[in-house]
Image (cartoon, helix red, strand yellow):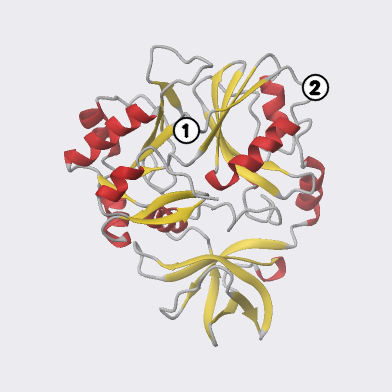
Amino acid sequence: MENKRTCLYDKHVALGALISPFGGFDMPIQYTNIVDEHQAVRQACGVFDVSHMGEVLVSGTDAERYVNTLFTNDVREMPVGKILYGMMCYEHGGVVDDLLVYKMATDCFFLVINASNIDKDWAWIQQHATGYDVTLENQSDYYGELAIQGPDSEQVVKEVLGIDGSDLAFYTFKPLRSSITPSPSPLISRTGYTGEDGFEVYADAAFINECWDKLVSSGRCKPCGLGCRDTLRFEVGLPLYGDELSEEITPIMAGLSIFVKLDKDEFIGKDALVQQKAIGAPRKLVGIELADKAIPRHGYAVLKDGKQIGEVTTGYHTISTDKSVCMALIDASYAVLGTEVEIQIRKKTFPGTVCKKKFYEKHYKK
């Protein structure tokens, strides 16, 4: 099957981007190089095409009750215009996907899901809607999305795009029309996946193309690929589905209990997660800092006294801090800060120390 392309694909090619498959799409990995793009976001402003992400609208009388059953976080007290992060889980507690939930109206929620999981998530969402008075719309093919990220992003969005985002608090959104309606409507939100302040614009292909052109031609917002998106999110300890979350990795294992509201009456996977929280997760996600400059990669074995105790989920020599570090899922008994371990890199082992999995301080607007 051929990969899909976003509405900006031709513009990426024209800019000389390195294109590679990701989540079923042909996506730009880098334009110049990952280091330059990473630093642009940390120091000024970068723009990402994230139109591959999926969007599902849930509306109707039972929309709130239904979304709360699907979602580990609690949407009942959300004001309109608020966004929550959380997971959809299987009955055994493993993760279907992590997602953002936007409250559009008292009876309308907008779910933003991962590109690689769109088909699976859509099937899951439909499967569990039986008995609820809800209307489900997969709007993934309608929406394009830009992520404008970095300390200069608020100013750039205002001066280049003419959109004032200064009234948006962290994890809130507003319509780019006069009112939020259940039909496809352009939105701007303030979340981000980089550890820096930033905004997301959701709209149809024509508007996304117009915004991209304005941002790139302004010279104030560097085009950035998914390569640095990964290095940026990794440095601040944000998970990527398929690495730090999966059908086998629960939110409790991943250290994301704050987004799992076990005091809710019911949600799919609650019983398993209550039990795991009570007895302790068998494995935990940790940070590991290496003494050497060797780079640990996904799947590399983590050892203790020659015995494998886990494996690396993501690893890099960090651009912002110049350290070789990784996140790894290891046996819980070794997940104590300061524990000395080894990482198998090809035919050699390198010493490392268990540390916090946030390697760089976030700079969100609070």
- Location of residue 117 with respect to 295 vertically, above or below: above
Give the farthest residue toward the front: 1
- Outermost residue to the top: 178
Disc 1 packing (10 Å; few <14; some 14–19; many ≥20)? some
Query: Camera-side residue: 5 or 336?
Result: 5
| Residue 254 position by quadrant | bottom right
| Numbered-mark total | 2
Name the residue that disc number 1 marks: 171
Q: CA distance from mark 1 to mark 2?
A: 31 Å
Q: Position of residue 114 (x, y in %)?
A: 55, 43
Visible in this render: residue 362?
A: yes
List x then y, in percent, for residue 359. 45, 61
Callout 2 secondary element: loop
In this figure, which residue is indicated by the disc labeled 2? 131
Name the spot of residue 212 as percent of width and height, x first.
28, 37
- Label 1 sits on a secondary structure element that is loop
Task: Mark yes or no: residue 46 visible.
Answer: no
Label 2 environment density (alpha carbons within 10 Å; few <14, some 14–19, many ≥20): few
Q: Nearer the viewer, residue 349 or 48?
A: 48
Instruction: Name the amino acid, label 2.
Output: Gly
Q: Amino acid at mark 1?
A: Tyr
The spot of residue 231 in percent (x, y) is 41, 58
State which tag comes first along the sequence, 1 or 2.
2
Which corner quadrant of the image does residue 213 belong to? top left
